[in-house]
Amino acid sequence: MSTLTAAEVDAIAARYPQAFAGPARRRRLGWGLAVGTVAYMAFAWWFFSVGTIVANGRWDIAGTYLADWVSYEVRPRIEFEDGYLDISFSRGDPLGENGNPDWLVRESAMVRSQAPASTTSGGSGGGTSSSGGSFLGTVEPPPQPDAASSADDQPPIAVEREETVRATATVGSGNVITAVPGVVTVTRGAETLVADIVRDESVTPRGPLPSWAAQKNPGGKIVVSFGFPGRADIEDDEIKISHRFWGWENFLFDTRSPFWGKSAPEVARMIVSGDRIDPTRSNLALAWNNILYNADWQHLDVWTKLLQTIVMAFVGTVFASLLAFPLAFFAARNITQSRLVNQALKRFFDFLRSVDMLIWALFFTRAFGPGPLAGISAIFFTDTGTLGKLYSEALENIDDRQREGIRSVGAAPVLVQRYGVIPQVLPIFISQSLYFWESNTRSATIIGAVGAGGIGLKLWEAMRTNSDWENVAYMVLLILAVVFVFDNISNALRRRLTGQIGH
């Protein structure tokens, strides 16, 4: 077979232009779509300033947030007092209020401080008049000042007590913070920062700040960053240290539990053979109670809210399916002949589904108050509109021959629908409802964040603190697990209903 030359192809195209017009037009259309897409992407890049946003993005903050999901922070505070340091931990700290980690070394000494004098004196006994048998006769004592003014006029008493005078915190490898009253020294690798502290007045660095330290205003606080290991805020009255560690601390037991800080074998021995810690219950019951009511992770509350989310999705979908089922028969043109009824119901479905579920949740939260009822109502309203539309379209696409066959034997209209229509559409109805049930499990989390109850509200509360991202990660993983399970259940049921199992 010989190959046509370009001149022969052009000659054939000239003789039969209609045969070559279609492919040429499609090629031009394809090139036009490609050029239009590139032009639109370039316009969007310019209009939304994508390049500037990417260049100015705080990627370090994004990295910190991601690290917060898989780590925890210990946050000691070193306060500057009169000649000594006061080290404290917050109540919610992973180490508890009385934390004493090995990376924070304290050095103590006897410190002389001033204490107010007592209002009582060991002198004359408090200003009572005396009349003695003196040869001078009765002698009136001089007037005595009142007790308050007497105490104010007396000089304070010097008291010595043992206090922390030096604290050294090692934050990661090669990062050391040393604090003494009036001076803070920070070492990171080969660089050192020394800052003078005037209590309640200023923080003044000695020399220029290294690249890992920042001070917005002269005399203001200095922020030093150590990367993943943590950071420190040096202020004129205290040092706030945040030391980061991998993992989820206190996941099972919080610092108030007698099992806190124990290894797994130690906990097992305490449960199996240890003496009863609480006389009213076994150690196993006590351990389970401590896990459920863990103050840091709040397992029982999180699991209860997750169950609320599942129930919200299930109940809302079931109610919507039950209402959409009969309404769809009236909305289908081939089932109900009244065009007015058809159009009224279809516009009603459009109204319900055109308002987003989140908006319905805000409305019902305002109407019913925060809680699962608002979430169930939002899912019910939205899904009634969507399922009603899908159901009615499925009814309009049925095979009328089966219905006509039932009608030809003289069956009543109800029996015609029962045996001629429902067997055709019921697997489709159930399949669609199962899909929406699985989808609503995710949607219920979102609407819960606006007050509609469930784990969404708990998730939003944890995110607002901006310090409990490990709790956020925990709840997100629980939601993913639940969605994964229900997705597989829904898919299996849909395959069985549509006759695809085993394919």
Image (cartoon, rainbow, N blue to C red):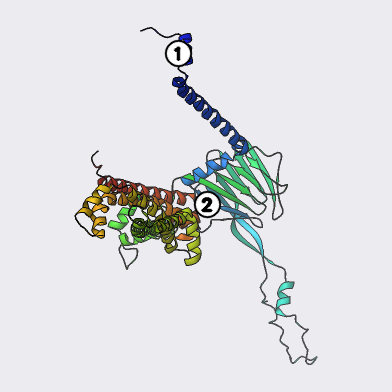
In this view, the residue in front, 11 or 358, is: 11
Name the residue carrying label 2. Answer: 467
Q: Is residue 441 left or right of residue 193?
A: left
Q: In what element is the residue under mark 1? A: helix
* Residue at image point 33% right, 52% down: 334
Quarter of the picture containing the N terminus is top left
Task: State whether residue 379 appears in this view.
Answer: yes
Amino acid type, residue under disc 1 in the picture? Ile
Mark 1 or mark 2: name the one nearer the start of the chain.
1
Q: Percent x, y for residue 226?
A: 57, 41
Give the x, y percent position of residue 29. 50, 27
Establish if 186 lies above or below 1: below
Q: Is residue 301 above or below residue 41?
A: below
The answer to whether one can see residue 92 in this image is: no
Name of the residue lying farthest toward the top: 2
Residue under the image location 34 percent in, 49 percent down: 396
Residue drawn at (47%, 66%) of the image: 368
Q: Which residue is mark 1?
A: 12
Check disc 1: other Cα within 10 Å, few if <14, some if 14-19, many if 20+. Answer: few
Query: Image check: 382 left or right of 428?
Result: right
Residue 85 image-quadrant placement: bottom right
The amino acid type found where label 2 is placed reads Ser
Which-is-in-front pick, marks 1 and 2?
1
Query: Percent x, y for residue 173?
Result: 53, 38
Element assignment for label 2: loop
Residue 403 rendering spot, x and y as whole percentages: 25, 51
- Crowding at mark 2 (Cα within 10 Å: few <14, some 14-19, many 20+): some
Between 371 and 462, the one lying in front of the other is 371
Residues 310 and 409: in front is 409
